[in-house]
Amino acid sequence: MKPKLALYWASSCGGCEIAVVDIEAKILDVADFFDIVFWPCIMDFKYKDVEAMPDGDITLTLFNGAIRTSENEYLAKLLRAKSKVMVAFGSCAYEGCIPALANFYDKKKIFECNYINSPSLQESSKNVFPQTHTQMPEGEIEIPEFWNTVKSLDQVVDVDYYVPGCPPQSTQIIAVVEAVIDILKNGKPLPPKGTILGAGEKTICEECTRERKEKKIKKFYRPQEIIPNPDECLLDQGIVCMGPATRSGCDALCIKANMGCRGCYGPPPNVLDQGAKMVSALSSVIDSTDPKEVRDIIKTIADPLGTFYRFSMAHSIFHRVQKMEEEEK
Amino acid sequence: MAYRTYLMVCAGTGCVANQSIKIKDTLIKELEKKGLQDEVAVVTTGCNGFCGVGPIMVVQPDGIFYQLLKSSDIPYLVEEHLIKGRPVKKFMYIPSEKEPPIPKMSDIDFFKKQVLIALRNRGLIDPEKIEEYIARGGYSGLAKALTEMTPDQVINEVKKSGLRGRGGGGFPTGIKWETMKKVPGDVRFVICNADEGDPGAFMDRSIIESDPHAVIEGMLIGAYGMGSTQGYVYIRNEYPIALERLLKAIAQAKEYGLLGENIFGTDFKFDIRIIRGAGAFVCGESTALMASIQGMPGEPRAKYVHTVEKGLFDFPTCLNNVETWANVPQIIQKGAEWFTQIGTGDVTNDPWGGSKGTKVFSLTGKVVNTGLVEVPMGITLREIIYDIGGGIKDGKKIKAVQTGGPSGGFIPESMLDLPVDFDELTKVGSMMGSGGMIIADEDNCIVDMAKYFLNFTQEESCGKCIPCREGTKRMYDILENISVGKGTEEDLELLEDLSYMVVESSLCALGGSAPNPVLTSLKYFKDEYLTHVREKKCPAKACRQLNVYTIDEEICATVGHGCDLCKKSCPDFAIFGETKKAHHIDQMKCHKCGACYDACNFKAIKVE
Amino acid sequence: MERSIRMVTVNIDGKKIEVAEDTTILKAAEAAGIWIPSMCYSDLLEPYGVCRLCSVEVIRGKRSRIVTACNYPVREGLTVNTNSDKVKWIRKILMELMYSRWPNVPVVKEMAERLEVTKPRFVSLERDESENACILCGNCVNICRDVVKASVLSFEGIGIERKVVLPFNEQSETCISCGACAYVCPTGHIKIKSLETERGALQDFYLGPKSAINIPTLQAVPRVPVIDKNSCIKMQTGGCGICSEFCEPGAINYEMKDEEVDIEVGQILVTTGFNLFDPQQIPQYGYGRLDNVYNSLDFEFMLNSTGPTGGTIQCKDGSEPRAVGIIHCVGSRDENYKKYCSRVCCMYALKFAHLVKDRTKAEVYQFYIDMRAFGKGYEEFYKRLLDEGVNMIRGKVAEITEESYNGNKPHLLVKCEDTLIGKFREIPVDMVILCPAIEPAQDAAKIKKILSISQSPDKFFLERHPKLDPISTMTDGIFIAGCAQGPKDIPDSVAQASAAAARILSLISLGEVSVDPIKANVIEEFCSGCRICNNLCPYTAISFLEDKKISDINEMLCKGCGTCVAACPASAITGKGFTDEQILAELEGLLTV
Amino acid sequence: MPKITIADLEKIREDTKRTLNFRLGTCKAKITVHMGTCGIAAGARDILSSVMKEIEERKLMDVIVTNSGCAGLCSKEPMITVEMANEPAPVKYIDMTPAKIKKIFDSHILKNELVKEYALALGSEKTA
Amino acid sequence: MSEEKKQNGWNPKIAAFLCNWCTYTGADLAGVSRLKSSPCVRIIRVMCSGRVDPSFILKAFKKGADGIFIGGCHIGDCHYSEGNYKTLRRIEFLKIFLEDFGIDPKRLRLEWISASEGDKYAATTLDFEKQIRELGPLTFMN
């Protein structure tokens, strides 16, 4: 009997699903080797089918997307229960990713924005908020509840492995799939729990071919402000590049396009918090000793929080932005 | 296809200044228009010497000489001469109003009496084409020297020829070469002095412009004789055309392997560098010139040790001027004997014994034909002035000839039959110099002319030694005093005393010869000086401060009808008189500027 | 090329003289005692031959010729007439020309008188300002170009407009102020504008003009002369070089240069000493402004038997001072300048007082805040001084002024409050000696940076522990001693230096050193070589390995501060003893209570 | 860079000889083509061209060509005058055609033999 | 809730990272000198204030610290020459960061206290405690 495979997308853009398909002919191997039991994006499966499975029936679940709603959470828990191996697939599941940028605001703010202030709202539909339960003539409609904070998968269920990337690089997916098939076919031991698959142990700098020098930064530039020298380290040139604090694996994709690394592969091993590390690293190389000038130089970084936690907000130490105490008062 | 006719357009500086390049361009355009471009060629040549009537064009092979051309004349000329074969009389040379035009260059007196050695290729070749120089026998002198003669034979040939330095001193070239040859050492230089500084003299420029390769060949032969491998040409930067042609010529010679290593397949090597001078008169002096090449201030030094022993960078250095070098190829090619046939004296035993060959003079002043003439040594001044120069302008009387530029002296009319050579000129207190020849007529004041030359020398004095710096200035001041009527007879004595002192004690030849115009004028025209100091009058009316301007009231009133022109011209408002009536000058107010004299159309202003 | 000197006989004014061939006529005549006038000749220069006054007549056979004696080389059998009528005539007119142009220049006047020119026939050209005494001899230009090789001066203009100028008529940077031009100027037209010598700027005990070659200090070891590179013409321009010709053993070497020598050492003892506080910062004390106000070093120099006064104590005018004021704590113990006590001044001030008493009859006043005679035998010396009759006034001097009474020669007035009697006093003295504070060497900050050691707030080098380890620094292997560490007198310095030396020796004899275990190191597997840490380390312990493309920490250099650990964005650096895990665990523990 | 030899000098001299002869006016023969209005109307231009062609083809170094105005005998145009350096008087040829020119070159110019049948007369004015 | 806490004898938790050479010794001195310093301060000794990783600060807040105090040598007097400059820059940056995170940057305090400034240590910690008390406890949203 073939091993069973489930794929699910929670709160995500769908890029990870595309990335899976993007492994080209390899997908045939996957289809051949696995019995796909659940993949709502591709085929019509019902939750109740899954619910009906015995626990641990699914060999492998690739779960992508963050946990935004009660439905996400329910499915995460359901699939966890039914799966032998649960993989947080892609940055959303791994560390919150783009959806977790919503953690800059709370549910109230988001609803205000979407259902009151959104310019696309018609006057009649303003101030209409989604309700979890609505009584309709046909019966009661239930829609999932919107959580205040976006969470990563491992913040709601136990996760065995992680595959980072927004989305994971297809080459990396192929490697992971091959490794999994190899393990399952040949009965090899599984890697230790919590292993990050499909990524390196070092940082993007390892994969970056630019020439790096000792750093001294007087001003940070936004990418549109200068034309960076393609052979020189972007950070040396004053462009915020998350590379030094980002796990390798993507083959320095953005940097090769002359853009600073945005950090989608998450923090490298041992790093607690990607953003805090960037603060530490960048402030170390700011070339000034005068507090005022230091502040001025820091101010040249546009939206440091959003920049440093673009992908890892949910997984950061603070998980989310707190309400300013003053606002509270 | 060969051409049937060549139009030799003069592109010497004089003619270029008179738009000869434009004429050339118009000619080419016109020929194209008429479809003659394959039959008739336009050639630019060096200076023909007859600069007074430029721009000049000679049509060959007919030898028709056209002068004073304007580009608007060209279409007519092409139509008439080149298509219809009718030489155009109105562009030809007319010796005087009564005489018919002379169509052929060779028939014009100005050219007829000249003997061309240094300028032999003028007007015949395109100076920018080495092939044409070679076609005229160029570089065969060098070939002969290198293949058939030893260096000593070369020096000996030059020595035998009696060639003397054409730059002014008249030092026998052969002796100089021989002395240099005897000085031990491997490094030695030859220099061509093209820093021609005398006002009005331009023979060196003309030679370089019309035949630069002759100079190069001369230097090559000299260098071979003296064992030098490096030559310099010190040329003033004010000679852009000469400089350009020289640069082109050197480039061509290098291309042909005539400069560089293994010339004509022999071991002989030679190269020429061009140094551009800034045009200081004193840099024509050999030691000052060498200092200038070395990057030092152009000041002369004492020559108790000669430059052939210790010259440029303290190495033996032989410096000759352009004309001297240009003579050398001919001497080697045709032999010393040929050269000695021209000129005066006997140089078989004593190189100082005579003046051989030709000399180029620049004939200027009050003479009809001005320009550059190459004449054999020994020709009389009279021949030059009257036969070649066509006599004095406007039928005036000649007063003096000034030869040798500002360092030369005045020769009075009584000595016009003096044969022109180095020694004769020196004997009468003048000098050959570089070949300036200025003719003064009765309208020229001798004091004024002496003052002119002194002004030049005192301004061009480098200022190093006291006699020249202070002395010439004082001489000028005295002359100035005399010319404004403040001179005394004591001043004349002092002037003479000072002049002799400056001659004796100056550091270099510039100072040593600067008083020559004063001394010769004092010698031959003492009376004129005396008139200036005693009567406070200038016989030639050239010293305006001594003149008294009056108005002939009758002429003014009757002929000029009181035209007021003089009144308007007077800067001192010294002329009074109502319009249409006679005017008069208030002598108290008159500053004797002479403006009224020049303004009057009726010769009503009288000068006394 | 060696050329044997040939002697030739020449006839000058009828005298037969034997001189070396190629000697100039001028020199030959000089040897024969014949005077030839000259205005532009200088022994130092190649003859330039411009004044022509030395014109003489050279007779060869029947032909005679006027030449200049200064540069005409003699040959065998040369006959010279230095005084013929023709020569006299030339000289006279030349002199007339010169005299009329420079009627007010003494040397010209003198020469004119000597040549019997009293009234030149030329109009006097007094268009030259009377100050313009330049006779255009060119000596200055030539010495500047040929000997000094600076080529600062040159002629401008030709003919009568010729004059000597500086480039663009501006003071040139090329001018090395050697003064050679003024030296060769025959008329004294060139003057050297003396640069105002500021007393405070006096360095190296420089108290007067000195040669470019000198022995730097009186106690210099080794006591050999050195060339002052800044004033040596040879060093500046490549000219001159006279000393090397003069030095027979050939000991002069211009090629020697200051060079950087790399010496590998295991330990360093820093004894860079101190600077003397510049009392000009306290203008009311008048140092540098008032005569006879000296600082202690000036006075020490005066006391020296090989000093400028030979050890006698005298005022600027040479007189013996009638009273001397010695002022303590100039800049020390002063809230405005140095807050600390310089420790040595009290005792040397007492020594000065003793010597003044000993060598002169002057009254001595000591102005002190507190007497700090704390050392062995010091207090006894203080007592002795009191017995010698030195006036001790307790109080900080307010001002020193120069006063003069009844037209007498001015003296100094020291104003201060005598705190012991509670009165304001004005004490007249002839000389004041200031005892300035000891301050850290001026380049201490530079040395600090080079050696990675610290400075205490007073800018002296910081010791590891003020009590327990006053000789070592925070940097292992670097020790400090003497005034580099803080003001101290000679015994203390010797003691500290000896201790440091002993420590160093003990380490050397040990053969190995133990290092603090708190070190950072790079975990190679995690370092990707972003180089963020590279210039963080003040001890340059971090280097970038180009081959591996990772950073590396030299554990011997690392002091374990952990800055790089915090900075590493990949957490690839760990700090032993203070790892992330340890600190986080600590946090956990602390905050859960 | 070619190093020149003495033989090269000679060669250059030969190559340029004709040009210079022209300029100096030294020649063995001088041919004047009469190019008045009448001559041009009768085809003197062609004659001039054919004369030039002959010189070119035969590589004659010392024959110069010039033109002049009407010779006065307009009915016999085109006309040329041939002057040989070694002959005392010039010869005028009338009613010229290119073929006749060829003949004149063959015999008169090269062999000094007059082509009597084309000649008008001997001893007319000399053209200097 | 915070009001409640305050009233219920709430004591803030202040985590302090002190430099081994200056502030830690200064704290020592304060103790030896019997000076009253804040009892809320929980000290972590580091060799240099430059060792303080911003992650520690975030972690400390997360773990329940209401305020964080960092003490280093005076500028220019760093035992390690210039480690405190880096601290200065990090803290400056972190304050901006914290503000963005919605945490009052006043909860983070950097002071230069030398080994001899026991009094300053005492005064500063007391002052900081007062400040934190005014700000109240730090709570996190879910």
Image (cartoon, coloured by chain):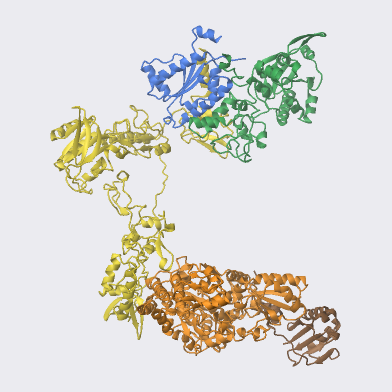
Chain colours: A green, B orange, C yellow, D brown, E blue
- Between A211 and A13, which is closer to the camera in this rendering? A13
Taking C168 as reference, is B380 above or below it? below
Percent position (x, y) of residue B36?
77, 74
Query: In the rendered view of the protein, which quadrant contains the N terminus of chain D?
Result: bottom right
| Image side of residue A269 versus residue C81, left or right | right
Taking B192 as reference, is B416 above or below it? below
Q: Residue at x 32, y 78 (%)?
A: C89
Taking B576 as reference, is E105 above or below it? above
- Between C212 and D60, which is closer to the camera in this rendering? D60
Percent position (x, y) of residue C43?
32, 67
Taking A268 as reference, is E40 above or below it? above
Task: Name the quadrant containing residue B470.
Answer: bottom left
Task: Say how many tags the image has.
Answer: 0
Task: Name the quadrant containing residue C442.
Answer: top left
Percent position (x, y) of residue C302?
22, 45
Q: Quick one: which residue is furthest to the top in this view? A: E8
Q: Residue at x 18, y 38 (%)?
A: C428
Percent position (x, y) of residue D66?
75, 82
Query: In the rendered view of the protein, which quadrant contains the C terminus of chain D?
Result: bottom right
